[in-house]
Amino acid sequence: MRSLFKKFRDGLTKTARSLAEKTAGLFGAQRIDAATLAGLEEALYAADFGGETTSEILEEIKAAHKRDPALRGAQAAVIGAAVLERALAGAEGVLPPAAAKPTVICLIGINGSGKTTTTAKLAHRLKADGQTVLVAACDTFRAAAIEQLQSWARRLDLEVVASHTGADAAALAFDAWQAARARGKDWLLVDTAGRLHTKGNLMEELAKIRRVLQKHDPAAPQHRWLVVDGSLGANSVEQAKAFHAGFGLTGLIVTKLDGTSRGGALVAIYRQLKIPVYFLGLGEQPDDLQPFSAANYARAIFGLDAG
């Protein structure tokens, strides 16, 4: 448990440090005051937690301070973490065992979100858990995506179905499902083309992939996860809304949290759309894709130790 929490703490260091700096060391032993609270408000907005969550955290800390004017920064941090964890109640996505062979996870998102790398890391994680996986390189729009996925596959010993740049992504998904079924795979992971959520033709490609998969299995893709770059902050909320409207998202993976001080956007996404968060990307190594834990996330954000 502590080793898992360390990944959260290390991966969210920049956001936690930003909060600490803007509050003149909120997490220390000194008493909080009006300046500390103003700094905390600024820091929470800067980290993209959104107005609702920011207000709730401040209100509870102010109420505690009114009851006890000697309230210390470390005590305020515990209160903030508790409010944050409560705001994320129900947000932890838990992936059930594959119900069908294959069960399909379709990973979508804009270019630069870390989607292709995340696809490989997720396949690696499922494989490490003793499950069988086939990966479909359906980002045929970008040659580098195919090469990137194949490079990860060689490194992590993954099976990949791929084609040439410009190939029909839906046809490849169709073939990959057949291959996964023939090989008895538990999971088929489909990496789709990176796209702006405002591009209608590329959104139509997603719909086409879904239609052809449903020719094999009416329930496919059983999981439709959006991969969002955690450093984009509030813009990722708009992405999630657009993809959810067009594709019916069932989950989120938030990446690159180790490289940003804006680690609060996932809270805003969950509170607005109630889409569960399955994994966080907390580093560059294969095992840095970690299952989301609201408690670990909240405590790491506020610089606390494991509960």
Image (cartoon, rainbow, N blue to C red):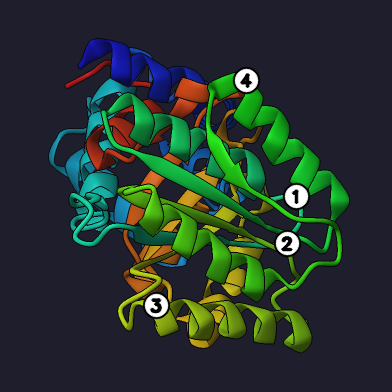
- Tags 2 and 1 in contact by the CB under 8 Å rule? yes
The residue lying at 18 percent from left, 42 percent from top is 64
Residue 12: image location, x then y, percent: 49, 28
State how far apart marks 4 and 1 are (Cα).
21 Å
> Is 98 on the left-hand or right-hand side of 177?
left
Q: Please identify, in this view, whether the residue under mark 2 or under mark 1 is nearer the observer.
A: 2
CB within 8 Å, label 1 to label 3: no
* Tag in front: 1 or 3: 3
Q: Amino acid at mark 1?
A: Gly
Instruction: Give the CA separation, mark 2 to mark 1.
Output: 8 Å
Residue ranking furthest to the left:
67
* Residue 286: percent from left, percent from top: 52, 23
Identify the element where label 2 is drawn: loop
Sequence order check: which comes first, mark 4 or mark 1? 1
Choose the circle earlier in sequence order: 2 or 4: 4
Q: Amino acid at mark 2?
A: Gly
Residue bearing mark 4: 155
Q: Which mark is residue 216?
A: 3
Above-or-below relation of 23 to 88: above
Whichever of labels 1 and 3 marks the residue nearer the N terminus, that label is 1
Residue that appears at 30% across and 78% down: 219
Residue at (20%, 41%) from the top-left corner?
82
Amino acid at the residue labelled 3: His
Residue 108 position, x and y percent, is: 58, 63
117 or 178, nearer to the observer? 178
Specify which label sits upstream in the sequence, 2 or 1: 1
Q: Compute the Cα span from label 2 to label 4.
A: 23 Å
Disc marking residue 112: 1
Q: Nearer the viewer, mark 4 or mark 1?
A: 4
Question: Which element type, helix, strand or loop, lies under badge 4?
Answer: helix
Disc on the earlier residue, 4 or 3: 4
